[in-house]
Image (cartoon, helix red, strand yellow):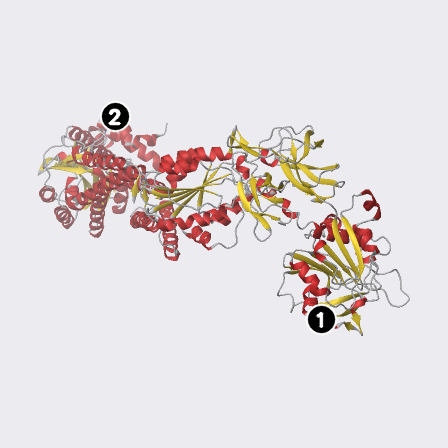
């Protein structure tokens, strides 16, 4: 069986452990590329520094220890080192799934885990921030291998809840970030479009590179409904009775406009925009990340 | 506008409420579902909901329309007038064109347009638009005033025309065609709505009128009997059509019950009434065919009697034929017996006894022959000739007889023919000849020595020369006078004219004796001479080359009938005519009916016949008294040289024709007047006429102007005239036969019906069911069932298309 099958959400969804999911996604992705994407990411020795508590024992340079009898740790520096932040929307709308298989949140976590795996694999420090109406969790970026476990552990324990205040949350995030970072936002952006854009401008203004992973459910994109429905917004609790057949064309037109509008504004402001729905394979998101990463290399 | 099943329309209206109720009451329960992107739904809420409502309403409308259309179609609506029907059709098709056009436009303007769908819809729209345009063109180009159809239950003004011609006596399935027609017509009359005006008419020249009620019409129908001199259906129709002028009802129908034989439907000359009827589409025309497609029949052909007057020792010769049409046994020949009877009523018969005429059954002579006919397949006709001769010492007087094909037949009326002949003493003939004109040729033709000696000669000739003819000669004692090559005459022309006017007959042969210095003698130019000679004599035509001879081209005249069968084989050219008189025809032919019977090959008249008063004169412009040669002059012709049988036959037939002129009325056709010369010196003035129909009482008949004129010859058979005055003995009589055409079973084709009734103007039925069906078609008028069903189909397709489009998953 082809490895690419692991890029399909319905297959990944059968794997319960997030680290394995990330591994499957990345390996499948890499297998599909045929050539290593890491050629330009060679890691070179930078300097030695004294061992301090918390450093990984395997990083200790035993040759230096033999010469000096002191513990020094090798410091490696990638050619283009960048700090990555995975910013995960934690709002209740992210928990929506039409087919009851993999909701938007699961899909986003899978994707985020894969990205974290990739970043950590190439020594990029990666951190994690979750938000709904404000920032809920924040894990500072680290390039250690243990960081991946920490990130995945946190991700696997997240549960979508609450309402979204995207602008406020991103403004908070911008204040937190000290250095120029790659901010990867996973959200459905089902908030006011102008507020979304304002928040993104703020991030860009601080010099951060931003990638938007616009994760929508398959049903939110294709609107496969027919007949009478009473729709309820999970965050606001508002209800609307509709004849889905009559609404379908208008809705699809509007959601397309919404995504196109975001894309347009993102391009204008140097933001990478990745429109995703839960029926898509994970490589689309990963490819987008790598393309962005190479551009910065 | 009429509706056959109004109730169905009401039910349809009620059924139409079903989709409405479903729409309002049976709205589906919505499925509850979380949907995070609801704000986009809310943004488009107004427009989407309006669109949804519009779609719902459109579909609801289409579904209601569909139910209504199906109900309307089943209700059987029909237009009362053709014009109105055309307008309704145009309106409906226009509406449906707009509907399909709207759907086509919507499909074209749609975001996800389907080229195939658009092409199909455009094609349908184009087709419907073309149909609309054609329909509109039909309406505007039609000059129709609007055919009135009326309501199906309205009373009608109906004419029931029953063909009662002889062929309607054809028996099939143990019923004559007339019985079948009357039975069906009686049923039809009982079906007419109350207050209908009904005229029952037969094809016997009866006056058409509306009966007081349907019972009276039925009674009139029951009295219709076969007629053997029927008028044609077109003729009866033309008379009957005029009756509608006094009809009170607006819906008018004509029912024609006929066996559709060609003779009944022979197209009349341009009858104005018939043409109006063909164009008047407010009148429903129904033809009910009661005939048989392939009849089987045996027919006895009309009798050809050689001499209607014979001497007591003479011979009666009859020629006829037996024809057989169709047959069930096509493998073997069929043998038929033909019998001839000759009889004479004695003075005591016929008599009326117990209200019925009793005829004498004494038979003087009877002969039978068996004829063999080859196998005859259905639709084919074979015939065989048969002849009888009868020679006996018959008493002078009127004799009658019949020839009959024995055996059962589907139509016995044409199996028997009748004849009447007269046994009389020889005709007295006076022959006046010019100076050197020999009567030898004439005598040898009409009264040969051998026959005279045996007492069988028809003619007893008295020969006088022109110089011997004087005032003492009484022409009245002769029935026929011959004048051979007369010279200058004194009172002859005046006497001859008087003789002919009073009923005598004369034959004049002109020759060289009339010539003086290259021109006719002045005695030939008097008014009497010109009257008798059929015109002014001009001068002799000369042709010494022998290229002028008698050249008859028509053989209808009794004197020429003998040449009819051998017309092209008569060697007239071997008997050249070198001289003949020319006659200036035009000026003097206006006063008397005159006809050139035989021309010469140079188209100049050779034999002319003229009716003067009660008699006839025949003039031949070249003589029959010429010698073989003459030392003094050139001979005028060679008519009697060599083998002179053509001139011999012509002379004899001319004599018979003139001598039998009084006997020609002895054999008439049914429908003709029987006219008998009645010399009061010999016969009684008053008679009683006994018809061959035993139930018919005898009719008194009186002599008028020397003639007995009987006008009621309405049945075939022998008629007897019994003298009413005492002192006169001997019955007179005549016979009547059905015209052969009246019994011709040849079927008329549709084209013949089209000529009479107009193409597409009539509805043809064969039985009661078909009559009802055709009545329904006609009375319900222009039905909209097919149109409504077509529209319903299109609406259903549009509804299906829209529903699929609106609710496609």
- Foreground disc of the pair 2, 1: 1
Q: Position of residue B80 (x, y in %)?
A: 32, 46
Q: Which residue is mark 2?
A: A15
Which of A150/B57 is in front? B57
Q: Which residue is mark 1?
A: B525
Q: Using residue B751 as the reference point, say whether residue B158 is left or right of it.
A: left
**Secondary structure under the numbered disc 1 in the rendered image:** loop
Q: Position of residue B366 (x, y in %)?
A: 70, 32
Q: Is residue B569 visible?
A: no
> Are labels 2 and 1 on one chain?
no
Vertical relation: B553 (above or below) B233: below
**Secondary structure under the numbered disc 2 in the rendered image:** loop
CB atoms of marks 2 and 1 within 8 Å: no
Quadrant the C terminus of chain B occupies: top left
Residue, far front = B727
Looking at the rendered structure, which numbered label has been put on residue B502? none
Q: CA distance from mark 2 to mark 1?
A: 146 Å
């Amino acid at each position: 069986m082809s490895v690419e099958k692991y890029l399909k959400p319905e297959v990944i969804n059968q794997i319960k452990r997030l680290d394995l999911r990330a591994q499957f996604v990345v390996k499948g992705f890499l297998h599909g590329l045929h050539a290593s994407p890491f050629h330009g990411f060679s890691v070179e020795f930078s300097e030695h520094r004294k061992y301090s508590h918390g450093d990984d024992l395997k990083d200790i340079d035993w040759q230096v220890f033999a010469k000096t009898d002191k513990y020094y740790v090798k410091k490696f520096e990638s050619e283009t080192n960048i700090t990555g932040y995975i910013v995960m929307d934690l709002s209740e709308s992210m928990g929506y799934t039409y087919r009851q298989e993999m909701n938007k949140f699961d899909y986003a976590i899978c994707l985020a885990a894969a990205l974290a795996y990739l970043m950590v694999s190439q020594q990029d420090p990666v951190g994690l921030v979750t938000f709904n109406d404000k920032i809920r969790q924040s894990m500072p970026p680290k390039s250690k291998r243990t960081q991946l476990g920490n990130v995945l552990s946190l991700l696997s324990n997240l549960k979508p809840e609450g309402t979204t205040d995207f602008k406020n949350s991103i403004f908070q995030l911008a204040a937190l970030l000290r250095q120029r970072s790659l901010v990867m936002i996973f959200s459905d952006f089902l908030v006011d479009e102008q507020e979304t854009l304002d928040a993104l401008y703020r991030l860009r203004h601080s010099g951060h590179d931003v990638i938007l992973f616009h994760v929508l459910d398959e049903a939110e994109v294709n609107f496969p409904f027919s007949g009478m429905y009473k729709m309820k917004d999970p965050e606001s609790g508002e209800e609307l009775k509709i004849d889905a057949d009559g609404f379908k064309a208008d809705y699809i037109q509007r959601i397309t406009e919404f995504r196109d509008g975001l894309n347009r504004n993102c391009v204008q402001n140097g933001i990478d925009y990745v429109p995703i729905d839960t029926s898509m394979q994970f490589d689309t998101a990963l490819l987008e990340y790598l393309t962005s990463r190479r551009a910065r290399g | 506008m009429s509706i056959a099943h109004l109730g169905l329309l009401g039910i349809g209206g009620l059924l139409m409420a079903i989709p409405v109720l479903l729409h309002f009451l049976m709205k589906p329960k919505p499925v509850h579902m979380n949907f995070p992107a609801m704000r986009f739904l809310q943004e488009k809420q107004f427009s989407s909901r309006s669109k949804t409502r519009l779609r719902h309403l459109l579909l609801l409308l289409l579904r209601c329309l569909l139910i209504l259309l199906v109900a309307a179609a089943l209700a059987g609506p029909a237009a009362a007038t053709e014009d109105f029907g055309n307008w309704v059709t145009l309106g409906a098709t226009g509406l449906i064109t707009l509907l399909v056009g709207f759907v086509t436009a919507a499909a074209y303007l749609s975001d996800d347009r389907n080229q195939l769908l658009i092409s199909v819809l455009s094609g349908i729209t184009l087709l419907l638009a073309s149909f609309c345009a054609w329909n509109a063109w039909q309406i505007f180009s039609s000059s129709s005033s609007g055919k009135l159809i009326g309501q199906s239950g309205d009373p009608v003004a109906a004419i029931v025309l029953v063909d009662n011609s002889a062929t309607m006596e054809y028996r099939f399935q143990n019923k004559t065609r007339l019985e079948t027609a009357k039975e069906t017509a009686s049923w039809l009359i009982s079906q007419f709505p109350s207050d209908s005006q009904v005229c029952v008419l037969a094809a016997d020249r009866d006056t058409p009128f509306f009966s007081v009620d349907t019972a009276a019409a039925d009674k009139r129908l029951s009295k219709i009997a076969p007629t053997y001199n029927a008028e044609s259906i077109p003729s009866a129709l033309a008379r009957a059509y005029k009756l509608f002028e006094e009809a009170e009802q607006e819906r008018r129908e004509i029912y024609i019950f006929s066996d559709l034989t060609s003779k009944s439907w022979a197209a009349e000359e341009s009858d104005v009434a018939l043409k109006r009827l063909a164009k008047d589409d407010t009148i429903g025309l129904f033809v009910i065919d009661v005939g048989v497609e392939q009849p089987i029949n045996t027919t006895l052909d009309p009798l050809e009697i050689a001499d209607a007057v014979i001497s007591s020792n003479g011979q009666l010769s009859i020629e006829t034929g037996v024809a057989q049409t169709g047959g069930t046994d096509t493998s073997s020949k069929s043998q038929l017996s033909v019998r001839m009877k000759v009889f004479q009523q004695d003075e005591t018969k016929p008599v009326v006894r117990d209200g019925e005429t009793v005829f004498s059954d004494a038979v003087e002579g009877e002969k039978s022959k068996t004829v063999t006919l080859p196998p005859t397949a259905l639709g084919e006709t074979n015939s065989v000739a048969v002849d009888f001769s009868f020679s006996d010492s018959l008493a002078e007087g009127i004799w009658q007889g019949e020839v009959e094909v024995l055996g059962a037949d589907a139509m016995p009326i044409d199996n028997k023919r009748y004849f009447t002949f007269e046994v009389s003493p020889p005709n007295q003939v006076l022959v006046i000849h010019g100076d050197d004109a020999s009567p030898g040729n004439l005598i040898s033709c009409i009264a040969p020595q051998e026959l005279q000696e045996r007492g069988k000669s028809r003619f007893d000739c008295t020969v006088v020369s022109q110089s011997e003819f004087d005032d003492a000669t009484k022409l009245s004692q002769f029935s026929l006078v011959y004048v051979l090559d007369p010279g200058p005459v004194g009172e002859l022309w005046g006497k001859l004219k008087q003789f002919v006017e009073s009923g005598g007959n004369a034959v004049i042969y002109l020759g060289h004796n009339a010539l003086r210095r290259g021109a006719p003698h002045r005695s030939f130019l008097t008014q009497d001479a010109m009257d008798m000679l059929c015109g002014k004599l001009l001068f002799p035509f000369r042709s010494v080359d022998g290229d002028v001879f008698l050249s008859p081209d028509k053989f209808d005249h009794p004197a020429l009938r003998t040449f009819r069968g051998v017309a092209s084989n008569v060697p007239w050219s071997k008997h050249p005519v070198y001289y003949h008189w020319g006659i200036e025809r035009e000026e003097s032919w206006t006063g008397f009916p005159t006809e050139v019977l035989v021309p010469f090959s140079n188209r100049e008249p050779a034999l002319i016949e003229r009716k003067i008063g009660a008699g006839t004169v025949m003039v031949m412009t070249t003589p029959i008294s010429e010698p073989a040669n003459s030392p003094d002059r050139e001979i005028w012709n060679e008519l009697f040289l060599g083998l002179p049988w053509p001139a011999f036959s012509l002379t004899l037939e001319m004599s018979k024709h003139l001598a039998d002129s009084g006997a020609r009325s002895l054999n008439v056709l049914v429908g003709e007047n029987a006219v008998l010369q009645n010399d009061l010196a010999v016969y009684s003035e008053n008679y009683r006429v006994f018809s061959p129909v035993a139930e018919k009482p005898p009719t008194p008949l009186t002599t008028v102007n020397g003639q007995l004129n009987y006008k009621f010859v309405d049945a075939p058979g022998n008629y007897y005239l019994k003298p009413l005055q005492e002192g006169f003995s001997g019955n007179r009589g005549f016979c009547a036969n059905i015209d052969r055409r009246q019994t011709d079973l040849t079927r008329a084709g549709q084209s013949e019906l089209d000529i009479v009734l107009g193409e597409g103007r009539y509805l043809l039925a064969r039985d009661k069911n078909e009559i009802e069906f055709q009545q329904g078609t006609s009375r319900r008028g222009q039905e909209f069932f097919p149109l409504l069903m077509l529209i319903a189909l299109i609406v259903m397709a549009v509804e299906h298309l829209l529903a699929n489009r609106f609710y496609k998953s």
